[in-house]
Structure formats: C-alpha cells, structure tokens
Amino acid sequence: MRKLLLVLLLMGQCCWALERQPNADYHARREALAKKTNGNVVVLFAPMEAEGPNAIFGFHQDENFYYLSGWPDPGAALLIAPAVEATADTPARPYTEIFFLPAHNYVEEKWTGPKLGPENPGAAKITGFDRVEVLDKLRDILAGFLPKGRLTVYSDIAEGSETAASTGPLEWLKRTNAFPGFVTLQDIKPMIASLRTYKDAGEVQLIRKATDASVAAHFAAMRGMKPGITERDISALMQYEFAKRGCERPAYAPIVGSGYYSTVLHYSEDSATMKAGDVVVIDVGGEYSMYATDITRTLPVSGKFSARQREIYDIVLGAQQAAIAAFQPGKSTLRREGANSLYKAAYDYINSHGKDLHGKPLGDYFIHGLSHYVGLNVHDAGDYSVPIGPGMVFTIEPGIYIPEENLGVRIEDMFYVDKDGKLVKLTAALPSTAEEVEKRVTGL
C-alpha cells in the first residue's frame, strides 16, 4: 500500500507542473529519430541541477532532451537503439529504448522534493519508456549495444568552446573506456532539428496557449500605456498577465524600448520613463510548458502616432502584409535569398516605400531577418533550407529603426501552416493597424 501511494504521489508531481503531451507523442519522436541513425545508437543526457549564480532562475530542461522524453527533471539520460538485422558477426536487435534515472539522494530531496526513482514500479508508465534503469548502469548497458566493428554513437556534441548537457557525461564515458577505439561520436542535433522543424498537433496547441496568454499581456500593455509610466512597469504588468494564464516564465528577455531605445533591437534595461510623443517597441512573450511565443507591437505612448510615426508604421505593416501575400505553401522559404524568399518580399516593400530624412530608401533600416521558427525555443531549431509547409510555426516581423529620428517600429506576429497548407495567424486577435492600436491605447 505504501508503494502504491508513493507511485500516485510521484505521478502527481513528476509531469503535472507542465502540461505534458501524451507519452505516445514522445515515443513516436524517438522512433522517428532512430530511423535517421542508420542503425546507430543515440545516448543523450539531461543537464544537472544548476548551482551558484546559475541557479537563480531554477532548472530548465534541455530542449532536445525534453522533445524526446517529455521529462522535466535534471540528471536523467536516455538510450535509443534502432532495430538491426542479424549479420555474420552480430545477432538481430529489436528497437530498444531505455530511460535512466539517478538513484535517490534523500538529503537533496529534502530541499528539492521527492523524485521518481528507477526502482519505482510505476516508472515505465510514468516516463513512457519501455524500460527504466538506474543511471549507474548506463555504462555497462551501453557496452552491450556496441558490437565490434565501426560504429557511430550519436549524442549532444558541443561546438567550439561551448558546452552541452552531454559534455560532462561523455567525457566520463571516454575516461572509463566505454567507447572503444572503433566508436565515433557524432552530433545528434542536426537530426533532431530536422524533426523539430515540423510541429505536431500537441505542440501547436501548447504554442497557442503561450501565444494566447501573451496576446492578453499585450492588451494589458495597451490599456496601461501613458506618458510618465516606466518601461519596467509595462514589462512587469505583462509578465504578471501571462503568468496568471499559465506561463512559467518569459520566453526571452522582455524588451520594452521607448524613444531612442525603440531602435535598439535587444534593449533589455527597460528602465526609462516613457515620454509623450515617443513610440515604444514592446517585444514580450511568455513560455507555456516549455513552448515559446514571440510577439512585438509598437505603440504611441500618448495614444496617437505623429504623421511621421504613422508613415513608418504603415510601411512596416505593409511589408508584413506583402510577405503574407507572397506566401505559397511548399514553395516560399524563410531564407533571405531567392525568388521565393518572404524576406525579399518584405524588404522590397520597405525599400520602395518612404525615405529617411536625407532622401535615402529605407531598406538599410531593416536590419534583421524577417522570420524564425518558434517552438521549444523562441528561435527554434529547424531546417531553414526547406520550403515552408504544414506543421511549421514561425514569425513574420519586419521592422524599421532610424536612430536619428528616435523612431523604431516592429510588428511581429506568429504564424502556423496547417495540414492543408493554409497560413494561419496565431496572433490574429491582437490589433495590427495604426487605427486599431490607437483605439486600444486611448481606450476610445
């Protein structure tokens, strides 16, 4: 009876802090990844709990590990071994997946709460893996999947001076001779990125929830906008609004930049007092159950755009509409180059409409890309070489930034391509035109 109660307790704690997709969805991703590895093994590690200054924001699971496992806690590992046919040297092997959980550290759990252990009779059902083992067995179990002969093991390989969640564990496996000389380590990230390019229905729903909560936050910013309020006031208001709708944290550092700072793309101080007559660029989105959104609106602090502000605003909006009109499923791309580039459609519109104070075309003031994928990361992993098609979630975000005029405008919306190839605007509820924005800010 005591074991049953513990199982129920842990089932109520392990996966409920986040809205998790069904285990079958994560299993399907692991099988899809296995098919890409040409019979080779995948070993992937979750990060350890952060310590010191890095622990200030709490633990956040590695995106790729979560994508394959749906597991939110630190210190775990997974092994995926594709099915292989028998050869003269090795027997046949069925598809195998094993989840490794660290042994209990009861002293630590007094601080962090009870954790699911590998000995728990409900561990396989909770995690959705066919088999669950203690992490200490990983080295010996892995050896059984490494027959003699040339072999590749796929994992999270860091690039250059960077580190990855698997860096430390892989070094330990090397030191303990877990990888014989015939084993080659290869990076699994490109394979996972190709899968993450296309969102399943469950992922789209989680992105919708992040987006809807963040749209509500932008409405709150419009209602609260007035001269004399600080950028930080608006940032805090928005974070409260999306948090009370289920978002765990911001999807990225909130940007609320007014006046000159409306022209600074990654302005993050959010410390200035907003002045009458300025515009403010608000790039704020929440993260819901690991999934991000990315939304930007430009507001007139006083409630009305000046003639020049309105001119630039309408050009930016026109550029976004030009990109939307140019979209063709299976043909358009998110790359900057090429006849089918959505970026080119937006850039050409900006460069052929309006001038700066010196009569120069405005193309040079559109200084960033038009689009990026959104998913488990606000700039999500994905294959940008493929045409846009069903299952892709991305932004369309033209902008013009003129420091000489203290005038920056960006309009950023979230889009999804449905199964029929239709472009769906996930942020459609949020006003886009200058008239609609003015009405929301003034309350008229």
Image: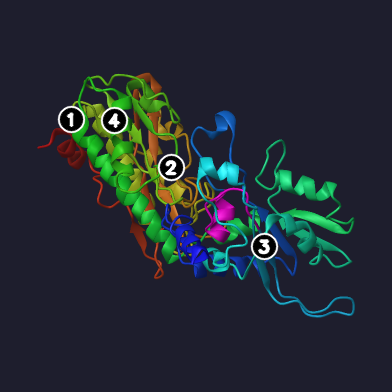
Q: Point out which mark residue 303 bears.
A: 1
Check the image and report above or below for 321 versus 122.
above
The magenta region covers: 62-77
**Tag nearer the camera, 1 or 3:** 3
Q: How far apart are marks 2 and 4 (CA)?
A: 16 Å
Say if the magenta span includes residue 316.
Answer: no
Q: Quadrant of residue 35?
A: bottom right
Amino acid type assigned to the residue bearing label 2 in the image? Ala
Q: Point out which mark residue 234 bears.
A: 4
Point 41% across, 23% down: residue: 269
Q: Position of residue 1 (x, y in %)?
A: 49, 67
Q: Do the residues labelled 3 and 2 touch (CB within 8 Å)?
A: no
Question: Is disc 2 placed on a helix, strand or loop?
Answer: loop
Say if the magenta span includes residue 72.
Answer: yes
> Which residue was labeled with disc 3?
133
Q: Do the residues labelled 2 and 4 touch (CB within 8 Å)?
A: no
Q: Position of residue 217 (x, y in %)?
A: 28, 41
Amino acid type assigned to the residue bearing label 4 in the image? Ile
**Tag nearer the camera, 3 or 2:** 3
Residue furthest front as drawn: 1
Classed neighbour count for the residue bearing mark 3: other residues with Cα under 10 Å, few (<14), some (14–19), many (≥20): many
- Of residue 3 and residue 178, the one placed in the foreground of this image is 3
> Which residue was labeled with disc 2?
251
Q: How far apart are marks 3 and 2 (CA)?
A: 33 Å
Q: Are marks 4 and 1 in contact (CB under 8 Å)?
A: no
Q: Do the residues labelled 3 and 4 touch (CB within 8 Å)?
A: no
